[in-house]
Image: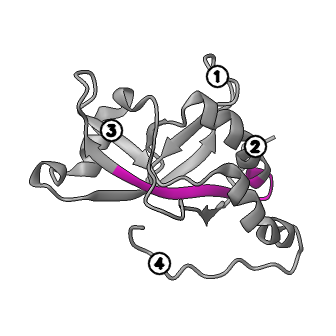
Amino acid sequence: MPNEKRQLEGVEIRHPSDFWRSIGGESFHQATLEAIDGGRCAKGETVMFWAYLLPEDGNSFDSKAVKLCDPEQRQVGYLRHGDAARYRPLVDDLLSISRFLMCPAKLLLGKELRARYTILLSLPDVDNIVSSHFDLFRLAEEPSYKPPARTDEGMP
């Protein structure tokens, strides 16, 4: 059976206030983060991008791992273990209907010796996402459903 690639549609989420959640594993993706930055952080610019939340099956450290990728599908890190355990069922459910979560990510120069860059996510509590997007999930299963066109092509 050939490996078919599905076209996935992003579901934009963000925390309702100015709350930013830290991630893990970004120390292993510094080259990618440097490419995203392009020298802007050192100039004092705020660097924002969309982070895609995708399941990572077969992760030997965390069976509920949720990896984070940039819009070019380059991995930039992971949700921390506790966040991954809460988000993974929703991530899997959305993927079953060809959807994925995406949220604003802020790239910062890190203060740790092992990571030059760090990332913070504008990620709401998972219970708020489920209640506010319930109609989207229900409608997405109907054959006549067409997702709304995105009006925001730029950064969050």
Please report the residue visible at 68 percent of the width from the left and 43 percent of the height from the top.
87
- State the quadrant of the C terminus: bottom left
Comes first in the chain, label 3 or label 1: 1
Q: What element carries label 1?
A: loop
Please report the residue visible at 46 percent of the width from the left and 31 percent of the height from the top.
24
For the residues labelled 4 and 1, the Cα–Cα distance comes to 34 Å
Q: Name the residue under label 3.
A: 118
For the residues labelled 3 and 2, the Cα–Cα distance comes to 38 Å
Decide if residue 98 is in sight here: no
Tell me residue 54's x, y (percent): 61, 44
Residue 62 is tagged as: 1
Residue neighbourhood size for the residue with mark 2, other residues' Cα within 10 Å, grouped as few (<14), some (14–19), many (≥20): few
Tell me residue 26's x, y (percent): 39, 32
Front residue of 128/113: it is 128
Q: How many circles with numbers are drawn on the protein?
A: 4
Q: Is mark 3 on a helix, strand or loop?
A: strand
Residue 152 is tagged as: 4
Q: Nearer the viewer, mark 4 or mark 2?
A: 4
Mark 4 is on which residue type? Asp
Comes first in the chain, label 4 or label 1: 1
Decide if residue 143 is in sight here: yes
Magenta stretch: residue 104 in it? yes
Q: What element carries label 4?
A: loop
Give the residue at the far top of this rendering: 60
Mark 3 is on which residue type? Thr
Q: What stretch is highlighted in magenta?
A: 94-106
Comes first in the chain, label 2 or label 1: 2
Q: Name the residue under label 2.
A: 2
